[in-house]
Amino acid sequence: MSLQQELNEIARDNGAYYFGVADLALARDFIAEQGGDELTVYPYAISLGIRLIYPIVDRLPHRKERSAALNYRHHAYNVINSRLDLTASVVSSYIQERGYMALPLPASERIDNERICAQFSHKLAAHLAGLGWIGKSCLLITPDSGPRVRWTTILTDAPLIPTGSTTESKCGTCNECVKICPVKAFTGRDFVESESRDYRYDAGKCEDYFNEMKGNGQIPVCGLCLYVCPYGRKKDQAAVREYRP
């Protein structure tokens, strides 16, 4: 069994549903700009993903109910992020024991409040690993689960083989995520690698919306763009289209 097969098996044994390897050469400049030059010493990224619990996501239209919001925040953020971090730690330790460098990155950690971003884009790694495409919601869309997946990344110099190439968008004329957004944060533009995220998404609008919810005593939860994507919902499409916040 190759090292890559061993890592895949370890990741899946520890709860990962998705495992991919990305060659980071083409994204080196972007990675350095967002996270610093220290990240560019790693030629590969291992992308790990865990599917969200569908019934919890399907309650998002009722997120103003405290039970729905609490359940989503707990299971779709706190628990999933902890599971991803633990899996990444186990895989990284194994890589290190095999004599290679491995840097597990937090599943969720903001380092730049002005740009509202983390040190590294987990969606970028998953995209480069061929696990899906970047949708109009700026989420990573998988063919089988849509955007209903949380991701984390391990940077490494282990001699791995990329699992695929970038996938072209399959969103087509669909604009469900754009239409359902309560603050109109998305422009509806397709993902273009050379363009800044700002052309497609105003993260500040979501930030202000969450702060407004906090100020009103609500639990700051939204996720409607994740909920509505047809690739994540295989049934009841009519009900999805009819719902508006």
Image (cartoon, rainbow, N blue to C red):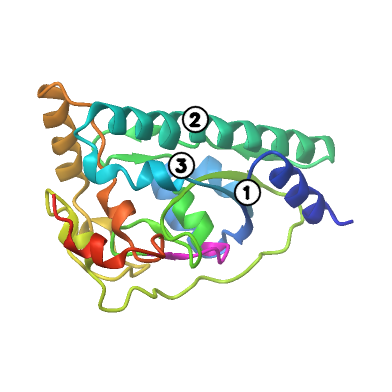
Residue visible at 78% across and 55% down in the picture: 4
Pointer 3: residues within 10 angstroms few (<14), some, or many (20+)?
Answer: few
SS class of the residue under badge 3?
loop
Query: What type is the residue that disc 2 sits on?
Result: Val
- Relative vertical location of residue 244 with respect to residue 192 in this rendering, above or below: above
The segment highlighted magenta reads 128-134
Question: Spatial distance from mark 2 to mark 3, Cα to Cα?
Answer: 28 Å
**Contact (Cβ within 8 Å) of mark 2 with mark 3:** no
N-terminal of the pair, mark 1 or mark 2, is 1
- The numbered disc on residue 42 is 1
Between 135 and 223, which is closer to the camera in this rendering? 223
Q: Nearer the viewer, residue 23 or 55?
A: 55
The tally of labels here is: 3
What percent of the width, then of the height, locates residue 201?
22, 55
Give the residue pinned by disc 3: 36
Q: Which residue is mark 2?
A: 79
Marks 3/1 in contact by CB < 8 Å: the verdict is no
Specify the farthest residue to the right.
1
Vertical order, 130 against 185 (above or below): below
Q: Nearer the viewer, mark 2 or mark 3?
A: 2
